[in-house]
Image: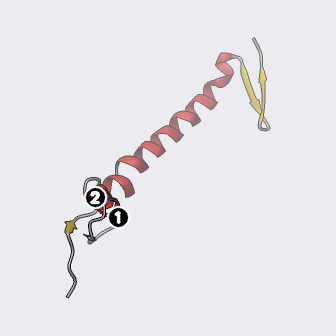
Amino acid sequence: MYNYDLIVIGAGPGGYVAGEHAAKNGLKTLVIERGTYGGVCLNVGCIPTKTLLQSSKVKHYIEKAAEYGLDLVNNQLSVNW
């Protein structure tokens, strides 16, 4: 038989933080998660989506750079003011 001070069900954004905080403060802690640690937001939702959106913005800015006097050829940057 195991004894725990705290059992956290779900390791989503709140659960894993609660478990980590409790363990760091000396509580014998068990975190139970059926899926991936960190939940949907961390693994397939918010964070990956933000990364893809930022990458597409950077691609767009690079494609439009010549309109602002920047020439990006062969990984070289030259400014044409």
The one nearer the camera, 3 or 46, is 3
Which residue does the numbered mark 2 point to in the structure image?
A: 12
Tag 2's secondary structure?
A: loop
Question: On the picture, is 9 further left or further right than 44?
Answer: left
Q: Which residue lies furthest to the top in this view?
A: 81
Residue type highlighted by circle 1: Tyr
Examine the image and state in which quarter residue 8 appears. Answer: bottom left
Tag 1's secondary structure?
A: loop
Q: Do the residues labelled 2 and 1 touch (CB within 8 Å)?
A: no
Pick the quarter of the image with the N terminus.
bottom left
Q: Which residue is drawn at 40% across and 46% down?
A: 49
Pick the quarter of the image with the C terminus.
top right
The one nearer the camera, 31 or 46, is 31
Q: Residue at x 33, y 52 (%)?
A: 41
Q: Residue at x 65, y 18 (%)?
A: 67
Question: On the picture, is 14 further left or further right than 64?
Answer: left
Pinpoint residue 52: horizontal percent, then vertical percent. Answer: 47, 45
Pinpoint residue 39: horizontal percent, then vertical percent. Answer: 31, 59
Which residue does the numbered mark 1 point to in the structure image?
A: 37
Sequence-first tag of 2 and 1: 2
Q: How far apart are marks 2 and 1 (CA)?
A: 7 Å
The one nearer the camera, 73 or 51, is 51
Residue type highlighted by circle 2: Gly
Classify mark 2: residues with Cα within 10 Å, few (<14), some (14-19) or many (20+): some
Examine the image and state in which quarter residue 79 appears. Answer: top right
